[in-house]
């Protein structure tokens, strides 16, 4: 039986559930807190990482750079560096989705407030402005008109340069919910509807969105697998929205949380992840 090493920075419900799932399956899983350690780029203790590494750091930048180091030394990491780079950046994800023919909201790229206003005029209001890297709905802005957009763009001009890569998107006309599907390897193991608790346009469960079971229909399965394949191979949370013309995928997440989805769906998502790792480690 292969051994798994799980890297984490702060243990959440998810990491504890993964440890429990491995125990139930008699799989050796070693959890390593990686935040306070240091690493020699030229040399790592290969044995410490077992047959496969599950990367579960909350910090995207921490996880990305540590994954790069481990992969450079031949360690198998889930998700891999390629997947982490693409899924961790909304612009790279959107490009991958477009290339793979996965329906995705109309999105524009600009680099200045002036360019962004021109793009927004073409998209029409209301529209959405998102940082290319970020999660939990943070720093996403729904702009209903020109004045609101100007205010957001002006703020962004005073931030770190990453926030001046303007990712501008049509506001999708959808019911007050979206869908999060869990892709593990080549299976969509579960899906939830996310309904915002306070009527907010952002449905993220981290913002209080409620998780309800969503049947994995043929349509959900097909589009989410295609979206995951567009990004690579591994464990993903695929976000999609229901439109009059069918589902559109707006995001593929690299390190997904599932504490609300397990009780809502009754699916043992951590057990699926452990099975996948055991298979991948062979
Ligand atoms: N183009 C859009 N139209 C309507 N709602 C959107 C759009 N983009 C995002 N949302 C809402 O905001 C939430 C967060 O957006 P998302 O792109 O997934 O960013 P994050 O990485 O922060 O989760 C979505 O789950 C959805 O509820
Ligand atoms: Mg999301």
Image (cartoon, rainbow, N blue to C red):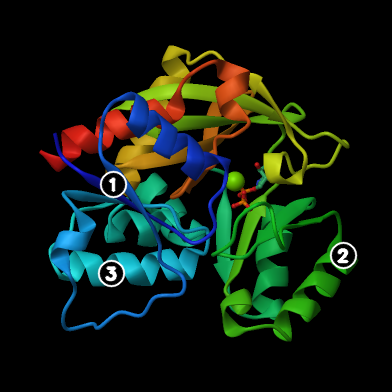
Q: Nearer the viewer, residue 86 or 267?
A: 267
Instruction: Give the residue at x 59% y 34%.
Output: 259
Instruction: Answer few, some or many: residues within 10 Å of disc 1's Cα (few below 14, many 20 plus, some between 14 and 19).
Output: many
Upstream in sequence: badge 1 or badge 2: 2
Residue bearing the label numbered 3? 68
Q: Secondary structure at mark 3?
A: helix
Residue 78's disc number: none
Dividing the picture into quadrants, the one containing residue 279 is: top left
Instruction: Give the residue at x 86% y 59%.
Output: 145
Instruction: Answer few, some or many: residues within 10 Å of disc 2's Cα (few below 14, many 20 plus, some between 14 and 19).
Output: few
Instruction: Answer few, some or many: residues within 10 Å of disc 3's Cα (few below 14, many 20 plus, some between 14 and 19).
Output: some
- Ligand 1 within 8 Å of disc 3? The answer is no
Residue bearing the label numbered 1? 232
Nearest-to-viewer mark from 3 and 2? 3
Q: Nearer the viewer, residue 51 or 269?
A: 51
Residue bearing the label numbered 2? 148
Nearest-to-viewer mark from 3 and 1? 3
Q: Secondary structure at mark 2?
A: helix
């Amino acid at each position: 039986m292969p051994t798994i090493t799980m890297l984490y920075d702060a243990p959440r419900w998810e990491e504890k559930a993964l440890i429990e799932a491995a125990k139930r399956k008699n799989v050796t899983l070693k959890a390593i807190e990686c935040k306070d350690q240091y690493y020699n780029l030229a040399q790592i203790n290969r044995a410490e990482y077992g047959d496969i590494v599950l990367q579960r750091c909350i910090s995207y930048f921490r996880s990305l750079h540590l994954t790069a180091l481990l992969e450079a030394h031949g360690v198998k990491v889930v998700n891999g560096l390629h997947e982490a780079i693409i899924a961790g950046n909304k612009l790279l994800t959107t490009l991958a989705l477009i290339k793979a023919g996965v329906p995705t909201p109309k999105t524009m790229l600009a680099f200045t407030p002036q360019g962004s206003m021109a793009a927004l005029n073409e998209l029409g209001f209301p529209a959405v402005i998102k940082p290319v890297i970020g999660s939990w709905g943070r720093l996403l802005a729904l702009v209903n008109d020109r004045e609101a957009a100007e205010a957001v763009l002006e703020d962004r001009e005073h931030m770190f340069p990453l926030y001046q890569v303007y990712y501008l998107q049509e506001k999708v006309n959808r019911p007050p919910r979206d869908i999060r599907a869990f892709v593990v390897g080549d299976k969509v193991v579960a899906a939830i509807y996310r309904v915002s608790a306070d009527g907010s346009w952002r449905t993220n469960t981290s913002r209080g969105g409620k998780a309800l079971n969503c049947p994995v229909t043929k349509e959900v399965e097909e589009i989410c697998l295609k979206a995951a394949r567009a990004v690579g191979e591994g464990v993903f949370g695929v976000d999609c929205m229901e439109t009059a013309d069918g589902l559109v995928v707006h995001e593929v997440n690299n390190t997904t949380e599932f504490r609300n989805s397990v009780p809502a769906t009754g699916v043992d998502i951590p057990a699926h992840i452990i099975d996948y790792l055991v298979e991948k480690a062979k």
